[in-house]
Amino acid sequence: MDNVIAALLTAAIVAGTPILFAALGELLTEKSGILNLGVEGMMLVGAVVGFIFTIQTGNHWYGFSAAMISGGLTALIHAFISVTLKGNQVVCGLALTIFGTGTSGFLGKAYQGLPTADPVSKIAIPYLNDIPVIGKIFFNHDPLVYIAFILAIIFWLILYRTKWGLSIRAVGENPAAADAVGISVSRVRYFCTIVGGMMAGLGGAYLSLVYAPSWQENMTAGRGWIAVALVIFALWNPIWAIAGSYLFGAVEAMTFGLQIAGIKVSAFFLQMLPYLFTVIVLVVVTIKMRQDAGAPNALGTAYDREER
Amino acid sequence: MIKAKMIKRQHESLLVDIGVPIFSILLAFIVSGLFLYFSGYDPGETFSRMLKGAFGSSYAVSETIVKAIPLMLAGLAVSLAFRMKLWNIGAEGQLYMGAFAASWVALSFGDLSSWVLLPLMFLAGFIGGAVWGFIPGALRGYWQVNETITTLMLNYIAISWVSYLVFGPWKDPASKGFPLTPRFTLSGYLPSFGDSRVHMGLLVAVVIAVLFYLVLRYSRWGYEIKVIGESQNAARYAGMNVARNMVLVMLISGGIAGITGMIEVSGITHRLQQDISPGYGFTAVIVAWLARLHPFSIIVVAFLFGALLVGGFGIQTFGIPYSIVLMLEGSILFFLLAGEFLRRYKIILVRKEEQ
């Protein structure tokens, strides 16, 4: 039994990692006041570009880098429309998702079902890995699991402990005030949106290069949207995003585990679990925390200097 | 030195209103054409094949209309919610729930006459979709739960539910293992025009568009929707019940998406099956936006997008991925959003004094 639980938790962390990357990116974007609902599309673009580059070069790290660049470029469209042109951010995010789904499907057509190069190898962390039970669950993973975890902490430090983070938060809370003290609202928002896209791209590449590892059309299956929901559960705090992502990973791992265990429930009901869980948690968190607790004040609204 | 400067428009410009959507579509085709070109396809040939696939024969035109009908209905459905700035992107799931409920009626009461069965299926379709719209509507109206995410998550749940039914308890034993329910009895078939596949759903869509137009333009409720969409605080100040209106709008929006599902199973597939919609609920978002949420424009724009879908299916046989249609749809929306800027701002060139 212990072994089963340990295996489940290990799988939870792996399943939660792509969501964590994407959620951290979206969190940063939202902190600057930009709502990017295109996470799903950016993840798909990252997944396919990462996969193609890995196959072509035989090196995962080129794949991950290319995925980040492609995610960032996709996000640049969103930044241009929502920051420079002050367009509707909700609709633009949807457009990004549709565009990303199409582009990834188009680019990936020839790569459907191909195997990747060698899997990304696991790195056991010396000593920590030897701790009974916990060592196996937390300290014997591929490097990206650690990178996601560390990035969450770095994001928190940057946002809450540096002047830079203060500027980002100021732009998200009160762009007019930030503008008045000489912070360039557009520059901060462009930066955060693009970094957000890079993170989503990395999350997507984790799916196609480590988790699956293969390319399937629409393989994100709503994870991008779950990442958007996760930012709300995490109350816009990167540390909570870690816990939230692993929790989601656990639901996903459980779904998979139950299927393997031959449980007498239709696979279709098990498939619903992560989505149902997202709705329930979103409802509970929203009601418990009062509306929009922790949401940046200016989230989703364009900044126009003349309209102060 | 000459410098571009943006100034706010004082008046709406008809030229920009009409020009922006047309240019958006043109530019999207240019961008996708470049993409095709660099991927080694011939864009001219691809687009002419799409055009031929959508309009080249009377059958092609009828298929375009067949695909336009659900887009009209789903476009109308989401446009109502969008008017209140409720981002219902759950039309796809609402469509599936409507199809499920209507199919239940058709399969359970198949021996009723058409005159009774079809209205019952309509009602069931509406209720199925309405429940799926009501849940996120009530959560949003009374507890401020983000409706974008809930509507989207409910899509996945609805689609899994229908898959469960057609693979499991509702599967036709005679279907040789295919995930299909038995065919409806003939009284569950929505009548078609002549011997074409174009069915009465077209009339339903037009009637709903007219109703929308009248209600939004002339009724008190239509006025409330407009005010709430512009400013919730102003609406509250004027004594309008914002929460109740949100629930109602989501319920009706979901219901009409549900009718879309009913129309598809009753008019086209004549049974419940997995892929009753190739993403109509999502394309509907673009249709509604391109039509600037205007009911009659939605009918026209849906027709164009029906053509895009049919043309897209057509090019698959020539080895060009269908995904190009999604790329086109996404790019049209990007250009449209960018064009919105021109509706609000004028760009003028000014001579800047050298210092």
Image: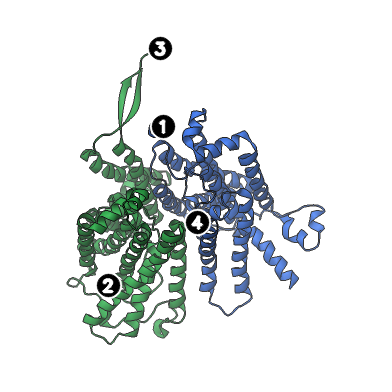
Crowding at mark 4 (Cα within 10 Å: few <14, some 14-19, many 20+): many
Q: Quadrant of the N terminus of chain A?
A: bottom right
The tint of chain A in the picture is blue
Say which residue label 1 marks. Answer: A305
Task: Answer whether labels 1 and 2 touch (C-beta < 8 Å).
Answer: no
Say which residue label 2 marks. Answer: B267
Task: Answer whether labels 3 and 2 touch (C-beta < 8 Å).
Answer: no
Say which residue label 4 marks. Answer: A225
Q: Secondary structure at mark 1?
A: helix
Instruction: Look at 41% across and 40% down and name the residue there.
Output: A81
Instruction: Look at 23% across and 53% down and name the residue there.
Output: B297
Say which residue label 3 marks. Answer: B355
Q: Are marks 4 and 1 on the same chain?
A: yes
The tint of chain B in the picture is green
Give the CA distance from mark 3 to mark 2.
71 Å
Picture quadrant of residue A133: bottom right
Q: Quadrant of the C terminus of chain A?
A: top left
Tell me which amino acid carries mark 1: Arg
In the image, taking residue A308 as reference, residue A257 lies left or right, namely right
